[in-house]
Image (cartoon, rainbow, N blue to C red):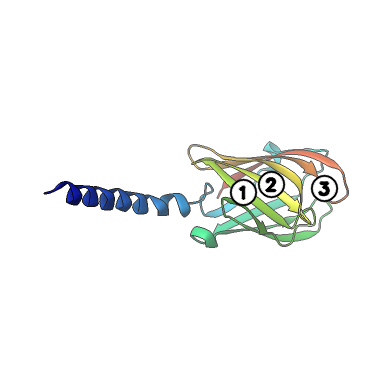
């Protein structure tokens, strides 16, 4: 084989490796496992509070089509439903059903952690980190921000896989 053939084959091989690596980077799976998650109110901390009476999260879909649907009863006893995209690309994606924000931008940190920013009318109103336990059975969200009434909050919410 001459030198030119060797260079062409090496280039093609390297390009093949690069293309093979793209799906794992560009379409990385979510940190949160699919399925039902239940808020553990006793293990969660809401400051200033009060906490919701209950919240269940159903995570479903694949790739860029994953979503999290939250269904629960708020502190005042009113039912709510909110739908979040589960896309970890750092870009804002619309959220429905939450009065405190209308979009979220989530970014993967590692296989068990992602950072998020909650956005209302183009302005970041809350941010935090979600960490999934090594066994995949518990997720803890640490969030600080300002609610729709302008009140500062600092919450730690714990969800358990059902």
Is 145 in front, or is 92?
92
Pick whichever of labels 1 and 2 is earlier in the sequence.
1
Q: Secondary structure at mark 1?
A: strand
Distance between mark 3 and mark 2 Cα atoms = 13 Å
Which residue shows up at 65% across the image and 51% down it? 105
Q: Secondary structure at mark 3?
A: loop
Q: Which mark is residue 147?
A: 3
Is 16 in front, or is 152?
16
Which residue shows up at 56% across the image and 56% down it? 59
Q: Is there a contact, CB below 8 Å, between mark 1 and mark 2?
A: yes
Distance between mark 3 and mark 1 Cα atoms = 19 Å
Q: Is residue 109 left or right of residue 44?
A: left
Pick whichever of labels 3 and 1 is earlier in the sequence.
1
Distance between mark 1 and mark 2 Cα atoms = 6 Å
Tag 2 residue: 117
Tag 1 residue: 106
Task: Say if residue 28 shows up in the picture.
Answer: no
78 to 150, vertically: above or below: below
Q: Is residue 142 left or right of residue 139?
A: right
Q: Position of residue 8 (x, y in %)?
A: 23, 52
Q: Position of residue 116 (x, y in %)?
A: 65, 45
Q: Position of residue 20 (x, y in %)?
A: 34, 53
**Residue placed farthest to the left in the image?**
1
Is 64 in front, or is 50?
64
126 to 70, vertically: above or below: above
Q: Secondary structure at mark 2?
A: strand
Which residue shows up at 58% across the image and 46% down it? 107
Pick whichever of labels 3 and 2 is earlier in the sequence.
2
């Amino acid at each position: 084989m001459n030198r030119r053939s060797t260079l062409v084959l090496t280039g093609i091989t390297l390009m093949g490796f690069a293309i093979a690596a793209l799906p794992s980077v560009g379409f990385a799976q979510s940190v949160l496992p699919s399925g039902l998650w239940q808020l553990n109110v006793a293990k969660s901390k809401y400051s200033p509070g009060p906490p919701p009476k209950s919240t269940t999260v159903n995570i479903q879909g694949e790739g860029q089509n994953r979503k999290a649907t939250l269904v629960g009863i708020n502190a005042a006893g009113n039912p709510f439903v909110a739908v979040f995209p589960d896309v970890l690309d750092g870009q804002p994606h619309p959220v429905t059903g939450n009065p405190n924000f209308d979009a979220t931008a989530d970014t993967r940190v590692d296989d068990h952690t992602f950072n998020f920013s909650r956005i209302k009318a183009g302005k970041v109103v809350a941010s935090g980190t979600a960490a999934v336990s090594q066994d995949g059975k518990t997720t803890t969200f640490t969030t600080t921000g300002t609610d729709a009434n302008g009140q500062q909050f600092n919450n730690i919410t714990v969800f358990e896989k059902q």
